[in-house]
Image (spheres, rainbow, N blue to C red):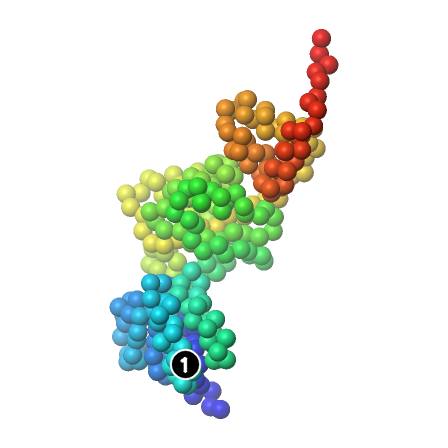
Amino acid sequence: MDEKTLAPGLYLVATPIGNLEDITLRALRVLKQADKIACEDTRQTQKLLNHFAIATPTVSYHMFNEGDRSLQLMAELKNGARIAIVSDAGTPGIADPGAQLAAAAIAAGVPVVPVPGANAALSGLIASGLPAESFTFHGFLPSKQGQRRSVLEAMVRGAATHVFYETPHRILEALGDIADVFGEAQHVVVAREITKLHEEFLRGSCVEVRATLAGRAQVRGEMVLMLHLAEAAPEIQTATIYESVQALIKAEYISEMDALKRVARERGIGKSEAYREFQRGQSRPKRKSTAG
């Protein structure tokens, strides 16, 4: 088959995240030859299509209509249609619509074809200066503080770099929680406006980066937030988890649960494991003092 002839199927097409020069020749060909383009926001995509003189019809495909629209598009795909999916910017299916229709197409035996290109998470990671051999992409952090801290506390220490998307109106809260959970010296990298005119990488402790952003009249642009958690240094534990928790409660007047979370984090173990050991400590005979 002529490689320039677009075969029937679903095409997941990455689009620029800021700089229009980042569109690939293959992406342009697919968008031109597709029967239809499913867009996260048709108005946003139309700007891209107009720039490259692409007249392919578009249809909306976003988080609020993804279920119903997937059924409609699947009917067309089963009849041999060539449909491209694009998000507003970057790679569809990565913190954007696309995965649901791709899964449905695979289940129905319809070819699903990736058309790679720009991606904010990967672009931020490779220029962050953090280890990139192994990483975990978490999408957006939760908007509520309690849920956000739970996600942070569950992060694994060691080889992997942790990558998040974050919004301008939540970045200060997120950096504040990182300081509370991992300490003010925790190194972070915030990549802002990647590939755009005002592209910026902020590197430093979470407190320093937060202060820089807090000092600005306005913070714009979605961001990539990255951090690498060093492996906890091995320590010889002379006190049991139960004893450590009780000491924290007495010294800092914090709740039993907050003390337990901190002890677990300091020892590099999970909260469930720490809680089980804490319960065992409660049932053991208390150590008698030899003083006096």
Whether residue 188 is visible? yes
- SS assignment at label 1: helix
Q: Please give left or right for residue 256 compared with residue 234 in the image.
A: left
Residue 125 sits above or below residue 22 on the image: above
Q: Residue at the spot x=51%, y=24% of the render?
A: 252
Q: Residue furthest top?
A: 292
Q: Residue furthest front?
A: 283
Q: Residue at x 46, y 48 (%)?
A: 189
- Three-letter code for the amino acid on which mark 1 is drawn: Leu
Judging by the rendered image, the residue that carries numbered circle 1 is: 77
Q: Position of residue 231 (x, y in %)?
A: 62, 44
Q: Position of residue 96 (x, y in %)?
A: 40, 63
The residue positioned 50% from the left and 24% from the top of the image is 253
Nearest the camera: 197 or 290?
290
Q: Quadrant of the C terminus?
A: top right
Q: Quadrant of residue 195?
A: bottom left
- Callout 1 crowding tier (Cα within 10 Å): few <14, some 14–19, many ≥20: many
**Number of numbered markers:** 1
